[in-house]
Amino acid sequence: MPGKDQFPNPVGSPDTMPGVEFALRDFRREDFEILWSIDQRCFPPGISYTRLELRFYMHRRGAFTLVVERAEPELAPEPVGFIVAEAGRGGVGHIITIDVLPTVRRWGVGSKLLTAAEDRLRVANCHSVFLETAVDNKTALSFYKRHKYFLLKTVPRYYSNGLDALVLQKDLLSQKGGS
Ligand SMILES: CC(C)(COP(=O)(O)OP(=O)(O)OC[C@H]1O[C@@H](n2cnc3c(N)ncnc32)[C@H](O)[C@@H]1OP(=O)(O)O)[C@@H](O)C(=O)NCCC(=O)NCCS
């Protein structure tokens, strides 16, 4: 199916996770509520988005949203993660948020979303991409390091709860993929 990328669960063995698959696809309007609820579960208050904020970022000029859904036999597929990114002016992309439900972390879902978004940004002529992450988000820092992002600067008190942000960047032309 065009725009839809099936990939098997890379961790669960066929004995323990029979038939579980994750599919990458573009956002559909009916996904919005579940994506917002995923964001609430992924970030603490003060960092997670209100509905208004999430809608605003998803609809910015050059923005796109990719979704990974979990598919199991005889169950309706359900979104378990998403990424919002935008191709900005001057060939610079921006990862606005990436959210994966705790129940499916470390199964490669985040990597699949990030790699697909970076590919989409390259197609939109972006030569680099940046993002902000909270200074205490060790998981995200490890994830982005794995994907070859480097530290650009610190922005003091960037988040409404007073936390500093780290701005990370990646060169999209010399770096492809995460490892
Ligand atoms: C960050 C996040 C998107 C990663 O998603 P994921 O699906 O678990 O990531 P992957 O399975 O693709 O992990 C790829 C690599 O990232 C690193 N990584 C991911 N989670 C990690 C953790 N908890 N501790 C250490 N390294 C980690 C590892 O190198 C991992 O590779 P490995 O599993 O082979 O060791 C997910 O943890 C998440 O949604 N967190 C909450 C929201 C958030 O913080 N978003 C990022 C800030 S914008």
Image (cartoon, rainbow, N blue to C red):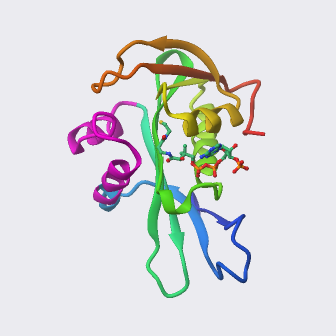
Position in image of residue 2 (x %, y %): 58, 61
Q: Is residue 38 visible?
A: yes
Position in image of residue 133 (x %, y %): 48, 28
Which is nearer the eye, 122 or 83? 83
Residue 58 part of the magenta segment? yes
Q: Which residue: 37% across, 58% down?
A: 28
Q: Quadrant of the C terminus?
A: top right
Q: Is residue 173 above or below residue 21?
A: above
Horizontal side of 140 relative to 79 (left or right) equals: right
Residue 172 part of the magenta segment? no
Horizontal side of 15 relative to 159 (left or right) equals: right
Q: Which residue: 64% across, 36% down?
A: 142
Q: Is residue 68 visible?
A: no
Q: Which residue: 71% across, 65% down?
A: 11
Q: Which residues are magenta?
A: 33-61
Q: Is residue 51 above or below residue 67?
A: above
Looking at this view, name the residue that lies furthest to the bottom: 74
Position in image of residue 159 (x %, y %): 33, 24
Q: Where ligand 1 lies, by quadrant?
A: top right
